Image: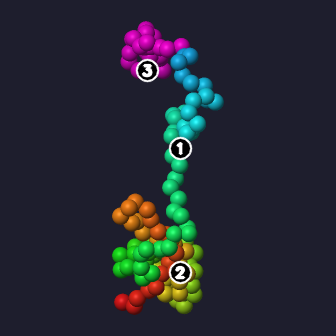
Amino acid sequence: MEDDGPDYGGEEDNALDDYDVDAGGDEEQQGEGDDDQEVGEDGNRVEVLEGQTQPSDRPRMTTRYMTKYERARVLGTRALQISMNAPVLVETNGETDPLEIAAKELREAKIPFIIRRFLPDGSWEDWSVKELILTER
């Protein structure tokens, strides 16, 4: 094979001649700058925000009963995990349906999920599935 020239099909000139290349010096050094920013894996600055925390000493305002929407979300999420070969936390006794296994785990309060309930003032309450009261459907 014979080399016919550059593969990119451009001119032989240096393509960087059309651009203004800064030799550096304007960028901050890695150790300097804002304390709330870090350098990410790709070299870009990432701003780190402080997370909000819920005061644990505040009494809970929402009901102890699991809503039908929370129940549906917990069962669906856990059934998906089981179908993706997550460890089953109860005796299956030959059951193979992930939704039935998830329902059994929920009845026995074995699902290790935490439900976050958001309140109108912007705060939230975290409830463990074990803490919530289930109503029979």
Q: Looking at the rendering, which quadrant does residue 34 occupy?
A: top right
Q: Which residue is at a point 57% across and 84% down the rendered structure image?
A: 90
Disc 3 secondary structure class: loop
Q: Nearer the viewer, residue 85 or 119?
A: 119
Disc 1 secondary structure class: loop
Q: Are marks 3 and 1 in contact (CB under 8 Å)?
A: no
Which residue is label 3 attached to? 7
Q: Is residue 39 left or right of residue 106?
A: right
Amino acid, disc 2: Lys
Sequence order check, earlier mark of 1 and 2:
1
Q: From the image, give the main secondary structure of the stretch colored magenta.
A: loop
Q: Is residue 73 left or right of residue 54?
A: left
**What residue span does the magenta drawing correspond to?**
1-23
Q: Position of residue 54 (x, y in %)?
A: 51, 62
Which residue is label 1 attached to? 48
Sequence order check, earlier mark of 3 and 1:
3
Task: Residue 18: say if magenta.
Answer: yes
Task: Residue 109: say if magenta.
Answer: no
Q: Position of residue 49 (x, y in %)?
A: 51, 46
Above or below, comparing residue 20 to residue 44 in the picture: above
Q: Which residue is at a point 57% across and 87% down the rendered structure image?
A: 91
Sequence order check, earlier mark of 3 and 2:
3
**Mark 3 or mark 2, whichever is nearer to me:** 2
Q: Is residue 65 left or right of residue 40?
A: left
**Mark 3 or mark 1, whichever is nearer to me:** 1
Label 1 to label 2: alpha-carbon separation: 33 Å
Amino acid, disc 1: Val
Query: Which circle marks residue 106 in the picture?
Result: none
Q: Which residue is at a point 53% across and 64% down the rendered structure image?
A: 55
Which residue is label 2 attached to? 130
